[in-house]
Image (cartoon, rainbow, N blue to C red):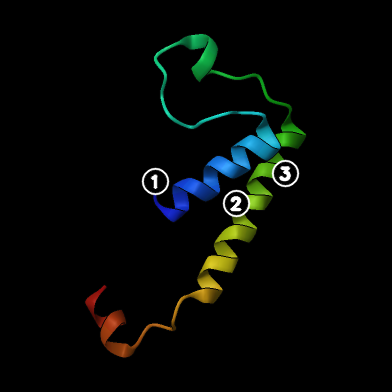
Amino acid sequence: MNQIDTILTLIAQKHLGIETLETRSSDSLDFHDTAVWCIRDALEAAFKAGVEVGISLPAPTEADIARD
């Protein structure tokens, strides 16, 4: 599991009450009723996590930007 998957799984567990983000091929395990305020909290946590990861990355050089 990479860093993004780990972060997303932790957010799903904490804010949405979802044990795993892996497909388990069962409607009762793969589909969830979730309150909108929980979804908002999860999205806010994901945004903040993205900001934190972005801050920790080195600034791109001109060569990096030119490659994109």
How many marks are shown on the rendered structure?
3
**In percent of the image, x 48 and y 32: which residue is there?**
21
Residue 63's spot in the image, x, y percent? 26, 87
Q: Residues within 10 Å of mark 2 (few under 14, many from 20)?
A: some
Query: Which is more toward the observer, 18 or 59?
Result: 18
Disc 1 residue crowd, few under 14, some 14–19, many 20+, Cα 10 Å: few
- Identified at 66% across, 43% down, the residue is 42
Task: Give the image quarter of residue 51.
Answer: bottom right
Residue matched to label 3:
41
63, above or below 12, in the image: below
Q: Secondary structure at mark 1?
A: loop
Identify the residue position indicated by label 2 in the image: 46
Q: Amino acid at mark 3?
A: Asp
Asked where in the image residue 61 lies, by quadrant, the reply is bottom left
- Position of residue 45 relative to residue 21, above or below, is below
Residue 10 or residue 40, whichever sits in front: 10
Amino acid type assigned to the residue bearing label 1 in the image: Met
Report the Cα–Cα distance between label 1 and label 2: 17 Å
**Distance in Å between CA atoms under marks 3 and 1:** 23 Å
Q: CA distance from mark 2 to mark 3?
A: 9 Å
**Residue 13 sits in quarter:** top right
